[in-house]
Image (spheres, rainbow, N blue to C red):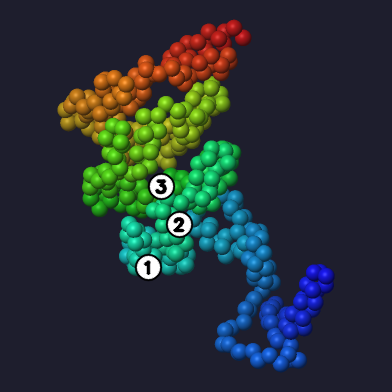
């Protein structure tokens, strides 16, 4: 009975409306016309009909409606429903940003993206809680969830919750190890397209965002914003365990996880060594594989660590600025190493043990000391699975263990 009713409704609709496809040369026009026998009065409007100029346009139009993605980017393997979307996307890789904002130095690959960006300057989509301006109503809605604390999307593996489904999908790649976005200039792969775009600026060498205080340049606007806190001194995020302050919430979270927590959920697949973050594992694996992902843009030299590349640029190509101690004139290429060096001159020990009154210059020194109070054995032999507290102990054991095989 239900099937009969559905067929009857379909028949009535088809009688009321007729779809006409007319062809003129290579042009297709789609019209929906009312049946002349229908007595219903239809309101005529002045809206233009959808004209599809070519067979290719008709194909793109159909794939857009169907959600089918037929066009692939050869650089990052991302798929698109139309050639035009692919063309706009490809400008990200070629740095062909034709549309510039008149109110800031940013440039964009399409006029529509520029129009959305201008909404930030006009405060069209402004958060009433914190005053942040977003480029679209969708972005504003997502941002508001950060104030409400609502995180409806939960990871089935670790139970971590997220405000958007997209964030959950990205997070799930940590567990699966999926990295669909590959750099066509080196062997690096990424779990997010944004991370690939950021990485591409390393090869391009373009640093479009300049600090108006010290003229230091950056390839990403976010890096410039982070750098500005060096001049302003703003550190609104304070650790409740040691009162250390940070300029960014992400740095505070990393500090708590790396300094105050002994949890090490990430394991090296080669030697069994345990780590607190996935990024530490990725860096450590280079020791086993011998990979050198950091290449010099001036010569053919490649490096295992970014710090090695930075020092090479300073020593061999005079690119960058040395950090010089005004007490002993020692030079440093890394700001964190320079900061710790100055603290040693001044006798400042900001890292305090929670179990005893001892203080330390660096987080690494504190972590090593905390093993005295803990039974945690973070280092494991990859041959016999025996665990150790200290790295030196597992290295010595591994040499003896390997000689038996």
What residue is disc 3 on?
205
Q: Distance between the residues labelled 3 and 1?
A: 34 Å
**Residue at the spot x=73%, y=83% of the render?**
17
Q: How far apart are marks 3 and 2 (CA)?
A: 33 Å
Which label lies toward us, 2 or 1?
2
What residue is disc 2 on?
142
| Sooner in the amino-acid sequence: mark 2 or mark 1 | 1
| Sooner in the amino-acid sequence: mark 3 or mark 1 | 1
Q: Which one is in front, 302 or 154?
A: 154
Q: Give the residue furthest to the front.
A: 1
Query: Picture coordinates of residue 402 (x, y %)?
Result: 57, 11
Q: Indicate the quadrant containing the N terminus: top left, top right, bottom left or bottom right.
A: bottom right
Query: Picture coordinates of residue 385 (x, y %)?
Result: 56, 16
Q: Can residue 193 be seen in this view?
A: no
| Disc marking residue 124 | 1
| Disc marking residue 227 | none
């Amino acid at each position: 009975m239900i099937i009969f009713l559905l067929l009857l409704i379909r028949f009535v609709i088809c009688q009321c409306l007729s779809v006409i496809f007319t062809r003129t040369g290579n042009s297709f026009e789609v019209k929906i016309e009312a049946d002349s026998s229908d007595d219903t009065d239809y309101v005529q409007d002045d809206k233009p009909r959808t004209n599809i100029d070519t067979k290719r346009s008709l194909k793109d139009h159909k794939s857009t409606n169907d959600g089918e993605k037929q066009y692939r980017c050869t650089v990052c393997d991302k798929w698109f429903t139309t050639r035009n979307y692919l063309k706009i996307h490809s400008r990200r890789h070629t740095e062909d940003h034709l549309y510039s904002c008149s109110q800031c130095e940013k440039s964009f690959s399409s006029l529509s993206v520029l129009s959305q960006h201008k909404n930030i300057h006009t405060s069209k989509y402004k958060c009433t809680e914190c005053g942040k301006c977003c480029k679209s109503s969708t972005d504003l809605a997502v941002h508001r969830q950060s104030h409400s604390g609502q995180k409806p999307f939960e990871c089935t593996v670790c139970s971590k919750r997220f405000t958007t489904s997209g964030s959950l999908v990205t997070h799930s790649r940590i567990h699966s190890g999926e990295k669909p976005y590959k750099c066509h200039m080196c062997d690096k792969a990424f779990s997010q397209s944004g991370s690939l775009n950021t990485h591409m600026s390393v090869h391009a060498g373009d640093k479009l965002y300049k600090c108006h205080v010290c003229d230091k340049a950056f390839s990403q606007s976010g890096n410039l914003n982070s750098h500005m806190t060096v001049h302003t001194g703003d550190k609104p995020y304070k650790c409740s365990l040691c009162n250390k302050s940070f300029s960014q919430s992400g740095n505070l979270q990393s500090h708590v996880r790396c300094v105050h927590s002994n949890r090490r959920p990430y394991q090296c697949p080669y030697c069994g060594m345990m780590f607190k973050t996935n990024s530490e594992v990725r860096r450590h694996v280079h020791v086993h594989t011998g990979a050198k992902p950091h290449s010099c843009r001036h010569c053919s030299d490649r490096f295992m660590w970014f710090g090695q590349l930075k020092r090479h640029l300073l020593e061999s190509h005079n690119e960058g600025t040395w950090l010089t101690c005004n007490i002993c004139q020692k030079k440093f290429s890394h700001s964190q190493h320079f900061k710790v060096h100055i603290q040693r001159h001044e006798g400042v020990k900001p890292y305090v043990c929670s179990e005893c009154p001892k203080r330390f210059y660096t987080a690494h020194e504190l972590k090593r000391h905390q093993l005295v109070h803990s039974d945690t054995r973070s280092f494991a032999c990859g041959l016999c699975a025996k665990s150790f507290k200290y790295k030196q102990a597992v290295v010595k054991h591994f040499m003896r263990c390997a000689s038996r095989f």
